[in-house]
Amino acid sequence: MTVWERPEPQTRPAPVPLSRERIVAAAIELADEGGLEAVSLRKVAAKLDAGPMRLYGYISTKEELFDLMVDAIHAEILPPEQAPEKGTGKDAGKPEGKGTDWRDALRTRAHRTRQTALRHEWLADLLGGRPSLGPNALAVTESSLAALDGLADVDTVIRAVETVNAYVTGAIRSEIADRRAERATGMSESEWQDAAGPYLSGMLATGRYPALARAVHDGADVDAGTAFDAGLGWVLDAVEAKLTPRG
Amino acid sequence: MTVWERPEPQTRPAPVPLSRERIVAAAIELADEGGLEAVSLRKVAAKLDAGPMRLYGYISTKEELFDLMVDAIHAEILPPEQAPEKGTGKDAGKPEGKGTDWRDALRTRAHRTRQTALRHEWLADLLGGRPSLGPNALAVTESSLAALDGLADVDTVIRAVETVNAYVTGAIRSEIADRRAERATGMSESEWQDAAGPYLSGMLATGRYPALARAVHDGADVDAGTAFDAGLGWVLDAVEAKLTPRG
DNA sequence: GTATCGACAAATACACTGTATCGACATGAG
DNA sequence: CTCATGTCGATACAGTGTATTTGTCGATAC
């Protein structure tokens, strides 16, 4: 009884060593080019010349992979010098500057977050979707808290950071949603005339939304970046008003 | 040639007439009890005694179903009296009241949104994920714009509404994320001692996050509702400061 | 009446997903 | 050499969104 085509003595092709980092990096690469939905365990594994099941030695579920991706990306949000390594916390207590340093800190943090989200649009789908507790995300929060430390009581500082965070994530999410919609309809047309255009025009023409119609008609088209910054400025003003005077 | 068990003369069970509304309602029901991931076209169809393909006569894709769900839920956010029907827009111009009416309007709108999201937690996954252009969502935006109409120039009004919206959606999203995480770890323990607790305690004990550690340790545990309202108040203060004085 | 046609619901099919299970191989110990 | 071990890959399964085919009914034309 002959067995044709015995599958060769099987000198395995040197199983490349895997690691969480390599897996996460591959997943991010996939997400960058095809969006979150392009990330499947099979494709990630294929990118690493491994079988799908191999990944389960490093992650326990796809959700965990997403969490790792989010935390990895948070490294891009942190200013380049301060990695979450080292630091005894001994000299990190007081803010070092006149009085608007906290504002610059929070503002640049917000803009870095936005820039990162524009580079990795899939971040919009994940940001805020679940609590970010990875080391890099914690470091980001830490630096925000540290920037306000001592300028008000603890509860006020916490409220400030959470409020700014809520604005930032909400604004980024909706900006990216708009951008995607434009890409989906526009794609070739300069203005949005294609799919949402006629529909929306029709809706506005019904007269049921007079204020909205006026806003769409009379509103200036500011670019997304300055709009984001304007709203951010308002929120920071609100924070400033709540800080203890004479901080 | 005999055929045993001919499948009965096949008096079809009176194909229940479908409709977008019935489909959306069924999908919302599924999402309410099992989250967004429990919504599959097969299950929705089964709930309506229909085959999966039947749905494609009413919706063209699952994403569209999600959009319809979001807009249907926006009806709960609108105050009960004003449906998007009727209304010539003739008498909707000026705000009718002293000067804090806009604030009440925006505030209650925000709280209604939050309450609705707490009733339908899956909303957090969808809110802001794509532009909401359904009639109900437009009506919600309309009423926000109308509340501020005339109190500042158009661009300021738009910025105000978008800023408040960003805060509201961001805050709701993270609140629901926290609530889910608590449910996942807590579930039986009163405080969070189970999964995230030890991990986070360990992280904080490293001394790498001094400000965060202090915040967690010294911060008062305010309930989510008042925290939401506090942040909202700040944002509304910021808006107020930008309105034309003597509005 | 019968025949034909069009519409539409149902069944089937496909490519793909996340993950559990299982079998086989390479390697270490005795 | 033999045997145990642990790890990797293949296979398997239940489920997904959707395209396509199949079947049946009702109405219309002769």
Image: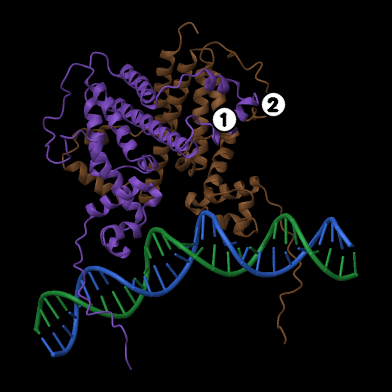
Chain colours: A purple, B brown, C green, D blue
Three-letter amino acid code at disc 1? Leu
User: Which mark, residue A238?
Assistant: none
Contact? badges 2 and 1 (CB < 8 Å): no
Query: Which amino acid type corresponds to the residue marked 2 in the rendered image?
Result: Lys
Answer left or right for B136 relative to B210: right
SS of the residue under disc 1: helix
Mark 2 falls on what kind of element?
A: loop
Residue drawn at (59%, 32%) of the image = A198
- Looking at the image, the residue that sits furthest to the bottom is A1
Q: What percent of the width, then of the height, locates residue A15?
A: 20, 66
Q: Residue at x 48, y 43 (%)?
A: B121
Q: Nearer the viewer, residue A201 or B53?
A: A201
Q: Picture quarter containing residue A107?
A: top left
On whether disc 2 and disc 1 are found on a single subunit, the reply is yes
- Image quarter where the C terminus of chain A lies is top left
Residue A193, position as x, y percentages in the image: 54, 31
Q: Mark 1 points at which residue?
A: B138
On the picture, is A169 further left or further right than B6?
A: left
Q: Which is nearer the eye, A123 or B161? A: A123
In terms of image quadrants, where is residue A199? top right
Disc number for residue B86:
2
